[in-house]
Structure formats: C-alpha cells, structure tokens
Amino acid sequence: MTALAQHWCALSALHERIADRIGRRLEAEHGLSVREFSLLTVLSRQYEGKAGHLQMREVAEAIVLSQSATTRLVTRMEDRGLLARTICKDDRRGIYTNVTEAGHRLLAAARPTHDGALAEALDEARANPDFKPLVEALERIGA
C-alpha cells in the first residue's frame, strides 16, 4: 500500500470515528442524526456570503447526499416541524427550504453537543500516532 493510500485510510477511519461519536451524542441528547444536524446548519447559513436561497443541488452537495436523498431528508424534517418549504414569489417553479423557529432552537441546543463531541473525538484521536498528524492539520486549518 502506498503512503498516500495509507493516509487516505487513516483519514477515512478518523472521519468514521468522529462521525460515530457525534452521531451518538446528537441522537441521544437531541434526537438528531449527523445528516440532520448538517442540513440544519447548511440551511441556517444559506444567506451568508451570497444573498438568497440555496438550490437543492447546492444543499445536497454541502451535506454529501444525492438530491433525491436530500429531498427525502428535507421532507422528514419538515414533517417534524424543523424545516418549511415556500414557493418563490418571482419564479413559481422555485421552492425554498428554510429552517423554522423550532429548527433554529434545536440547532442552537445541539451545537454545543456537536462541538463537545468533536473536541472529545479529536482529543482521543490525537493519542493515536496514525491520527495525530491529521488532527494537527485540522487544527492548523481552523486557526
């Protein structure tokens, strides 16, 4: 196995460990999956940077799901009252998805849980020689 392939395997394993830790905590404390948390986060930031709503394709790319899976996820979260869809006033074919007040409250409550689980997972990973350089790289990127 090449060094690049070994690093890729380590990165993939680190990602799985982190996602598992975050997912278990979000589910236990807030009834949210990692994908649901990601969707709420992406949609709550959709006005930052560029004005306006994100297209479903952009949302799907941001949370790394197919468009059809993203649509199903949005529907489930809409049924829970966390998201709401509205028709674009300028183009009746356009449908916007927005985070509801309940969704914003849940996201605000879940964010410290997410961040805490992430910090714990990274601290644990730092002790593993295969993961330590990856954790340090993430910290440099975040600085």
Image (cartoon, helix red, strand yellow):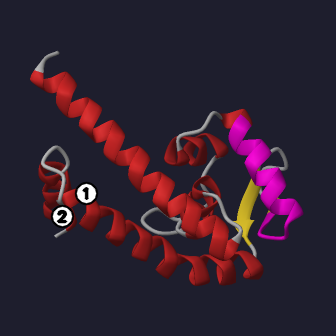
Label 1 environment density (alpha carbons within 10 Å; few <14, some 14–19, many ≥20): some
Kindly report the secondary structure that dominates the magenta region of the rendered protein: helix
Looking at the picture, tell me which residue is in the foreground, 89 or 57.
57
Closest to the camera, between mark 1 and mark 2, is 1
User: Residue 16, how many percent across, how many down?
Assistant: 42, 45
Which is nearer the eye, 2 or 53? 2
Q: Earlier in the sequence, mark 1 or mark 2?
A: 1
Alpha carbon separation for disc pair 1 and 2: 13 Å
Which percent across, then down, holds residue 79? 89, 61
Residue 98 shows in the view: yes
Q: Residue furthest top?
A: 1
The answer to whether residue 88 shows anywhere in this view is: no
Q: Is residue 115 magenta?
A: no
Is 17 left or right of 89, judged from the image as shown? left
Find disc 2 in the rendering and name its residue. Answer: 139
Could you say where residue 112 lies in the image, as x and y percent from the top left? 48, 81
Q: The disc labelled 1 sits on which kind of residue?
A: Ala
Which residue corresponds to the image point at 38% horizontal and 66% vertical from the top-left?
118
Q: Quadrant of the N terminus?
A: top left
Asked if the stretch drawn in magenta spans residue 80, the answer is yes
Please name the residue that numbered disc 1 is placed on. 125
